[in-house]
Image: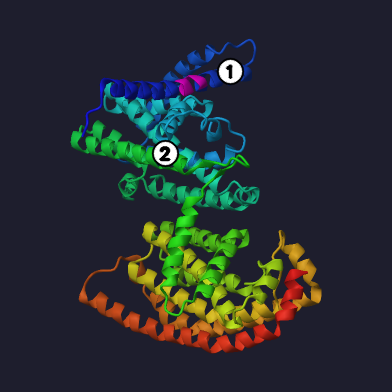
């Protein structure tokens, strides 16, 4: 291999210097913009240089305040208390960009994409430059106060090191915050999604977070039982979160445990580098559209659809026409916000119940019967999701129902394609729901597989009734639900609601054997789903028995679905004209 000459080395050196100079130029531009904004916001009689004196004075004040709070808090859980407070700041930083990025200029990456800088360097410059923003600068005295307070307890010589570790944590938090902002730009840039997020999802998540913190504080504060209740180690259970990692590093250095200190510092640096890497990858995925000037992600969705299409093509009996129809229906469903809402609502409702369960489990004096209702509650949430997904399968076709019925395919193939597409969506949503249960540790592996297989069988049982309701009462999906109901007329809507109630009663009767033999046994013994699956002979024998029960009920669900297909296909053939009138006009 030929060695590069001195000109090549000089060219590489100048390219690196130019990139570093561009990063410094971005930081300098950020300082000038912040200084100009600060000068415009301050009164005329107050010079901007007075802000520096204010920060110094506030740093001294918050230093004494941090020392007072640390000495006021009991020794055994003072670090847990501050770790809990930093967790509030950390989660607030994740929600903040979604609230302010519509009007925020500092986190708008579209103005930085014009610089000829690699994406990772650009993201690094943006994170460092965010330290100069006014909201972040206002938190630096708080961070310094925490460092001084911790230094007064252990050693004041450690305070600068504590502050430096806090800056590393703050940079990682800003990196993760900007990555969340990219999620907003790529997925939530639609205004309908933004309104939905602000009006529904954000209040629900805020309620969950406040409820979680309220339960945690009740479990930790020694006000009710000052010396009898054992301390709950918050930092030990949440060591993987950056705020807890920071406080564990400070605690280890204060106790002169240098081995643990270096391990936690290494973990904190790895977390920050991981967030920086995720942010740089997110910037690399973003592409500037030449036509509309918006940010988009193109190849990720294409890769996912291609892989899914390859998997479905290997299923025996899957024809090319049926495969094309399934992929078309899948794209059509995932494009509609109503379908996404059906997937998100069970997840949010289950998260509320998880928050209640988490608090109740750690209160040893209480044995609420709410613990026994956990599997039934999750199964009920999946039942409602399956009912909504299967009840109006053709409403999103609108005028395209004419082209769908004109295709040279049978009614049975159209039914199977629709059912396969919503089946994939339901399985994905239920896996996300149960995956959250596995991450939070509220369910064992055995209980998770029982609930998931039971939900799949339940969905197969609900499909015949959903097919009949979708064919007999197709409702055109429009921008507003009340407008769509208004087009149908009062008598038709009343008949549709009565039919849905009758089908819901029939579906409940059909799914009742699954609930009795698969779900209720989990509710009889709380320890069977609150403890992890043990690898012994007894657990594996019970697992094999559960598998045979599930296999029998799976045959029951598949048999009911296969028997209903010819009947539903005949109804579909009779109702073609009425479906076109309801959806295309």
Q: Is residue 125 above or below residue 449?
A: above
Residue at 25 percent across and 27 percent down: it is: 4
Disc 1: which residue: 36
Disc 2 on helix, strand or loop?
helix
Res. 363 image quadrant: bottom left
Q: Position of residue 477 (x, y in %)?
A: 69, 65
Q: Position of residue 303 (x, y in %)?
A: 45, 56
Q: CA distance from mark 1 to mark 2?
A: 28 Å
Q: Are marks 1 and 2 in contact (CB under 8 Å)?
A: no
Q: Is residue 60 above or below residue 478?
A: above
Residue 335 is at least partly visible in this image: yes
Q: Residues within 10 Å of mark 2 (few under 14, many from 20)?
A: many
Q: Which residues are magenta?
A: 25-29
Residue at 36 percent across and 59 percent down: it is: 441
Between 427 and 82, the residue placed more toward the observer is 427
Residue at 67 percent across and 76 percent down: it is: 406
**As drawn, is 104 to the left or to the right of 400?**
left
Residue 27 included in the magenta stretch of the image: yes
Disc 2: which residue: 280
Label disc, if present, on residue 428 of the rendered structure:
none
* Precedes in sequence: disc 1 or disc 2: 1
Between 374 and 187, the residue placed more toward the observer is 187
Residue 200 included in the magenta stretch of the image: no
Q: Position of residue 247 (x, y in %)?
A: 33, 37
**As drawn, is 57 to the left or to the right of 225?**
right
Res. 392 image quadrant: bottom right
């Amino acid at each position: 291999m030929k060695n590069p000459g001195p000109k090549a080395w000089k060219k590489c050196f100048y390219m690196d210097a130019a990139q570093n100079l561009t990063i410094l130029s971005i930081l300098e531009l950020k300082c000038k913009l912040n200084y100009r904004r600060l000068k415009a916001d301050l009164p005329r009689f107050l010079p901007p240089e007075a802000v520096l004196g204010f920060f110094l004075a506030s740093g001294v004040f918050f230093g004494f305040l941090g020392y007072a709070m640390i000495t006021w808090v009991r020794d055994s859980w003072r670090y847990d208390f501050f770790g809990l407070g930093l967790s509030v700041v950390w989660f607030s930083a994740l929600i903040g960009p979604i609230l302010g990025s519509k009007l925020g200029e500092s986190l708008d990456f579209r103005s930085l994409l014009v610089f000829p800088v690699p994406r990772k360097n650009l993201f690094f410059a943006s994170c460092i430059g965010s330290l100069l923003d006014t909201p972040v600068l206002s938190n630096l005295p708080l961070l310094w106060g925490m460092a001084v307070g911790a230094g007064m307890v252990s050693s004041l010589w450690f305070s600068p090191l504590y502050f430096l570790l806090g800056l590393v944590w703050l940079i990682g938090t800003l990196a993760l915050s900007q990555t969340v902002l990219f999620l907003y730009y790529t997925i939530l840039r639609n205004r309908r999604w933004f309104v939905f997020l602000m009006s529904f999802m954000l209040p629900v998540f805020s309620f969950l977070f406040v409820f979680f913190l309220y339960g945690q504080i009740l479990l930790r504060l020694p006000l009710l039982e000052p010396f009898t209740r054992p301390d709950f180690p918050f930092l030990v259970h949440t060591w993987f979160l950056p705020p807890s990692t920071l406080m564990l590093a400070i605690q280890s250095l204060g106790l002169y445990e240098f081995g643990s200190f270096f391990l936690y510092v290494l973990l904190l640096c790895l977390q920050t580098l991981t967030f920086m890497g995720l942010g740089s990858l997110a910037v690399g995925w973003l592409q500037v559209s030449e036509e509309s000037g918006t940010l988009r992600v193109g190849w990720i969705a294409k890769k996912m659809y291609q892989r899914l299409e390859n998997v479905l093509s290997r299923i025996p009996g899957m024809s090319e026409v049926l495969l094309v129809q399934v992929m078309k229906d899948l794209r059509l469903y995932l494009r509609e916000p109503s379908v996404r809402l059906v997937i998100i609502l069970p997840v949010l409702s289950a998260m509320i119940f998880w928050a209640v369960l988490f608090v109740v489990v750690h209160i040893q004096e209480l044995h609420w019967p709410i613990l026994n209702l956990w599997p039934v509650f999750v199964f009920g949430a999946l039942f409602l999701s399956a009912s909504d997904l299967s009840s109006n399968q053709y409403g999103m076709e609108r005028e395209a129902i004419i082209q769908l019925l004109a295709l040279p395919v049978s009614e049975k193939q159209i039914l199977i394609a629709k059912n396969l597409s919503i089946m994939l969506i339901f399985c994905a949503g239920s896996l996300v729901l149960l995956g959250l249960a596995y991450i939070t540790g509220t369910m064992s592996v055995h209980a998770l597989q029982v609930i998931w297989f039971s939900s799949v069988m339940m969905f197969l049982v609900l499909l015949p009734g959903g097919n009949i309701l979708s064919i007999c009462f197709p409702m055109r999906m429009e921008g507003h639900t009340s407008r769509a109901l208004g087009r149908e007329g009062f008598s038709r809507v009343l008949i549709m609601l009565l039919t849905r109630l009758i089908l819901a009663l029939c579906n409940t009767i059909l799914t009742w054997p699954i609930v009795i033999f698969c779900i209720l046994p989990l509710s009889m013994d709380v320890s069977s789903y609150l403890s992890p699956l043990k690898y012994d002979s007894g657990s594996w024998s019970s697992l094999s028995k559960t598998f045979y029960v599930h296999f029998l009920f799976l045959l029951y669900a598949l048999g009911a679905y296969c028997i209903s297909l010819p009947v539903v296909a005949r109804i579909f053939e009779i109702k073609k004209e009425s479906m076109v009138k309801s959806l295309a006009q």
